Image: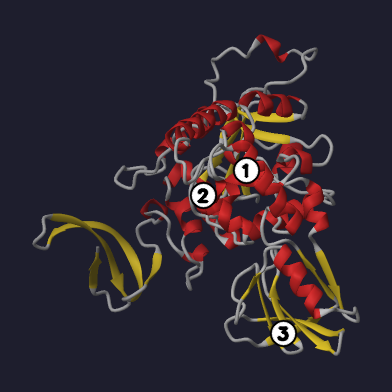
Amino acid sequence: PFPDWESLPYDVFSPHQDILSQRLRTLSRLSGLQQGILLVSVTTLMHRLPPPEYLHAHSLMLDVGDRLDLTTFRQQLTQASYLAVTQVMTPGEYAVRGGLIDIFPMGSDVPYRVDLFDDRIESIRAFDPDTQRSGDKLKGVHLLPAREYPMTEEAIQRFRQAFRAAFEGDPQKTPLYCDVSQGVSPGGIEYYLPLFYAHTASLFDYLPAAPLCLMEAGVLESAQAFRQEAQERYELLRHDRERPVLPPERLFLATDELRAALQHMPAVVLEPFLPLTTELPADTSPASTGSVFAPGAPPSLPVSHKADSPHGALFAWLKAYAGRVLMVAETPGRREVLRGLLQDNGFFPTAYDDWPAFLAGQERLGLSVAALEKGLLLRDPAIAVITEPQLYGERVAQRRRRAQSARDPDAVIRHLAELRLGDPVVHEDHGVGRYRGLQTLDVGDGPTEFFFFNDAATTEIYTP
């Protein structure tokens, strides 16, 4: 992930250190990455970034056995915008205590403790910032800069010159200018990033050649809306003499620049579902520069436990549909529940390990396991993918968002329609029994449906 700053254009506070750490780690890895997936929003993609050479020039390598001059090392950390503290807790901090140096590098999940013997690095260990206990030994660590801008004397001088060139008036009356001149990083300084560099870059400058771009429909519309928001905030704040702001074109890519960059990349655009009766666009012929794959929206097959046949919609659709069908369960346990349900109603699915295996097969009805939210309908070949949320709504999807439960998730009933009269069940409070259906009772708050079963002693038990 390449996260957003999580601030509005021209905000007066800086991003959280964890966000900056993740951004710098991603940028540092992109240059040498051979394979992977980069996740980024279109608004984040439009932000101008430090040039790639900044990361290389301000990164440090510490290896066991290296000589380390403590005074010079402190200066390097300060120039890389690391903050000296008494106890290291978050990325971008360091502490020196005699021959020990605690440092939390940007892009790292844990801080490190560097033990010096005279002027040599004797050992490097990871440690827990809460307990201060040292852990595993390492041969070396890679230190990224703590900010997306430098605070060297040269960079501060460039900032001062660029600030005076960009804004009229006495810069000494601007607190932000005075802070940077003294080597202090004020809140919101990220929106003055171009003043630290002779030229800025974009995320496209960090990417390898010809990456595959997957984007949702409406990306350029979202980009245009963001630029409009930035322009409106600029017009609102541009007359503040104590904190003048840079025009949007210096901070963000224009929509035309974004369009031009995306047009030079192979791309997959995710469009909304089309009705199967919709004619495909004329440019989908093999001679065109691209192809259009137009699956239809999955059918709505909700389960109703109040109906005589709760899964009636699913069974009727399976009988009527002429193509092949792959039903997708979320876990192996849920797959077996669906298998039993289908077999009890005259459908005998074949298990498949994955999508390619299903495509290579010939059976009309397949069953597999995958964490899919939505299914689809393909035109040619005629294939349908049916997922659990199509049957049980959001219940399946919500389970993944909750904290992991101590119960076995495969053993929990997802829907009452999965139960048949007489099925053995284990109630969390009342123990083992057999399901006897639903009962409507009035216990003082109006009619309410209750789960009804018999325990081992045949006592009737109701539970809401």
Decide: is 376 above or below 127: above
Residue, x 26% and y 56% (percent of image)? Answer: 438
Decide: is 245 above or below 18: above
Q: Residues within 10 Å of mark 2 (few under 14, many from 20)?
A: some
The residue under label 3 is which amino acid type?
A: Gly
**CB atoms at circles 2 and 1 under 8 Å apart?**
yes
The residue under label 1 is which amino acid type?
A: Phe
The numbered disc on residue 174 is 2
The residue under label 2 is which amino acid type?
A: Thr
Q: Quadrant of the C terminus?
A: bottom left
Q: Mark 1 or mark 3: which is in front?
A: 1
Residue, x 66% and y 44% (percent of image)? Answer: 195
Q: Does the image show residue 155?
A: yes
Residue, x 60% and y 82% (percent of image)? Answer: 86
Residue 17, horizontal then vertical, whole percent: 59, 62
Mark 1 lies on residue: 163
Residue 382, horizontal then vertical, whole percent: 64, 26
